[in-house]
Image (cartoon, rainbow, N blue to C red):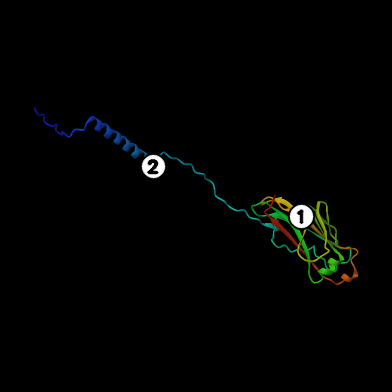
Amino acid sequence: MKHAAPRETGRVRPSGRLALAVLALVGAVVVLMGGQGTFAFWTDEATVRGTAIETGTLDLKVNGSDSHVTTTLGMAAMVPGQTSAEVVSVRNSGSAPLTYTVNAALTGPDAAAFASAGALELRVVRNGTRSGQPHATCTGGQVLATHRFVATGPTTVVAARQGPLAGNSAATPVCLQVSFSGSAPSSLQGRTTTLALTFAATSDVS
């Protein structure tokens, strides 16, 4: 007796279903691993405000001016032993603190003659006062420097760095005294020189 051959019914055998399930699981894992960058992460941020930056200003004034013209420091028809003096106010009119030096140089046609004789001396006195007539001197206060001019050339720092002066600070009186040596040689008769004075400011307050 012959048996009929089994027919294909299109059903997946249990072993086939297991294989399909494994493949589906592997595919899902691959998809999940490959799509990690698509997850939505929560974020937040905080800002820093008040970061405007404004530069300060340096504005050193002598008697309220950038170019003071003295009326009492110069000497005419001077003779050995004569002195002259003037009190100037030094003020920081800028917004940034500063320090300053007092610089000086001999200039003019006969500067070399005065320098070689060492005939002129400058004294700088903080909080000093002018006294005496006609040969005025600086009295009181703190002597910052006494400098005898023995050479011509570039401006020399006479009084080392002073300050610091705060921005928009009150004025500080500084007395300047010029002395013509009592032992000045007669060869300086009729000669002329100019004392160039500069108050130089810097923002270096260290």
Q: Nearer the viewer, mark 1 or mark 2?
A: 2
Q: Position of residue 35 (x, y in %)?
A: 36, 41
The kind of residue tagged 1 is: Ala
The residue tagged 2 is 37
Q: Secondary structure at mark 1?
A: strand
Name the residue furthest top. Answer: 1
Q: Position of residue 178 (x, y in %)?
A: 82, 61
| Residue at the image position 81 percent from the left and 55 percent from the top | 145
The residue tagged 1 is 160
Q: Secondary structure at mark 2?
A: helix
Label 1: how many Cα within 10 Å (few below 14, some 14–19, many 20+): few
| Residue at the image position 84 percent from the left and 67 percent from the top | 114
Q: Give the camera-side residue of 181 and 36.
A: 36
Report the quarter where the N terminus lies.
top left
In the image, is residue 18 above or below residue 56? above
The kind of residue tagged 2 is: Gly
In the image, is residue 195 above or below residue 23? below
Report how far apart the C-alphas of labels 1 and 2 lie in the structure.
67 Å
